Amino acid sequence: MSISLLLLLVAAIGVTGYVGGNRRAQALAGGRLSSLHSRPGYYGSLVAIWALLPAIAVLLVWIVASPVYIGSTIRSGFPEAVQAEPQATQNLNYNMVGAIARGLKLLTPEERATISADAAAARALLSSKGVPLAADPAPYMVEAAQNLDRMTTTSRMIVTVLVLAAALAGAVVAYRSVAPRLRARNRVEGVMLAGLVGASSIAILTTIGIVASMLTEAVHFFSMVPAWEFFFGTVWDPRFAAAGATDSSGQFGLIPLLAGTLYIGFVAMLVAVPVGLFAAIYMAEYASSHFRSVAKPLIEVLAGIPTIVYGFFALASVGPFLRDISAQLNGLATGSYASFIQAQSVLTAGFVMGIMLIPYVSSLSDDIITAVPRALRDGSLGLGATRSETIKRVVLPAALPGIVGALLMTASRAIGETMIVVLAAGVAARMQLNPFEPMTTVTVKIVNQLTGDLEFTSPQTLVAFALGITLFFITLCLNIYALYIVRKYREQYE
């Protein structure tokens, strides 16, 4: 039975339990609902919860444990020569076994009986059923696939019985425990509270998992390459090694990548901050309600555009435009029409990234400016100040801590951008101050180091995790500092 159908049956049992618990509570009350500790709906919810939770718990355990047990059993049945091969090769063999097992479900009994006779014929037969294989299957693979198919079928039958039994048993026990003095509401709300706590903990646990996974691989990298060479190196030349090699030759200097990241982010902030901040001031202080209701959503549309689209815009329009206009200016000045701005450059990437960041600056700043108490404006205007003087000397100083925090959060967003930099600034890791030349960022090199069929055994690949944990630490510091500024000065103007 499929998992979706099994969940549907469990849900049906839960609904039935809810109806039964509700009716039993009403019957025990005898028309006097005041004799019940809780409303009848709580009793029904309690029965439904006891029908659902045990069944879902059993299903989750099966989802986690069954593949591990079946996989280890099938791998242990491989020939000793196969088990002695590298782990990556064993994984490829097991993947082929899984593909064959999926293909067996599409074969007739007669075709199953002949599939192990000829490897080439078996491959052709499975391909005809829509199961392409990379190579002819070995005899042990066909046998392992048959065992895998058999164990998977048996496992699904067992879990179906266990899940339905757990759902029915939980519903029956909870149904029989329904009594007028049963604190059903307290128990249901306790379960809901636990669910809310679990949901709120997902973000924390996810962050911990991400950091732990990156940190583990980064420690492995630093065991091959000294940390001081990575953090203070000025040359980036990873020199990809052959697959499976652990040669640490190459230079993994972070400084060129960090310089490119900060440089492009700085140019982007030079574009985004004035435009976004002035737009926020206009819409919060000068624009009519009708114009604001139209302009603000239009500006925020920019935040919903995928970054790859911005990259295409930079590659196809902005970069060639800057290159051509620089050639024209150079021709007017020197007579030579050689462009001094390359199509892929820091300026191109920073300008387009700044356009992308405008809605972040504008929306956050607008909310912060709008939150400044109206009494401060009225007091300034009442003392004879003009509207512009009120904005410069009262509103902006009052909103400044929040605006600074918003700008820091926007900067962390700029530092983590990838697709615009790939298409607009190139992949050249260099240290230079000319904004008309290409540079690259940390995120681009993370993508480059993890692109392709690679093993996490060489420093050329593991360096991506060191770059990732470094970038995570930088953005985390920016966000923490932004929250610190906002919280420290927020009450001063309330």
Image: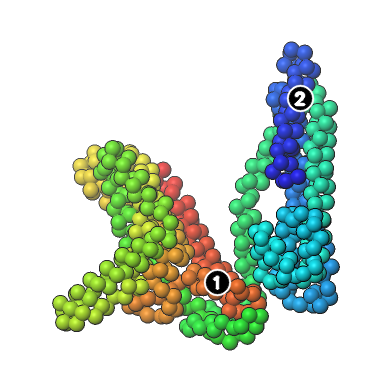
Specify which label sits upstream in the sequence, 2 or 1. Answer: 2
Check contact, mark 2 vs mark 1: CB within 8 A: no
Q: Secondary structure at mark 2?
A: helix
* For residue 197, above or below residue 269: above
| Residue situated in front as seen by the camera: 195 or 308 | 308
Residue 64 in picture, x, y percent from top left: 75, 54
Q: Residue at x 77, y 59 (%)?
A: 111
Quadrant that contains the C terminus: top left
* For residue 28, above or below residue 243: above
Residue 402 in sight: no
Residue 213 location, quadrant: bottom right
User: What amino acid type is highlighted by mark number 1?
Assistant: Thr
How much space separates mark 2 and mark 1, taking CA atoms? 56 Å
Q: Residue at x 47, y 83 (%)?
A: 234
Residue 149 in picture, x, y percent from top left: 79, 57
Name, please, the residue furthest toward the top: 31
Residue 139 location, quadrant: bottom right
The disc label shown at residue 451, or none: 1
Give the residue pinned by disc 2.
Answer: 20
Q: Residue at x 52, y 62 (%)?
A: 476
Q: Residue at x 27, y 41 (%)?
A: 291
User: What amino acid type is highlighted by mark number 2?
Assistant: Gly
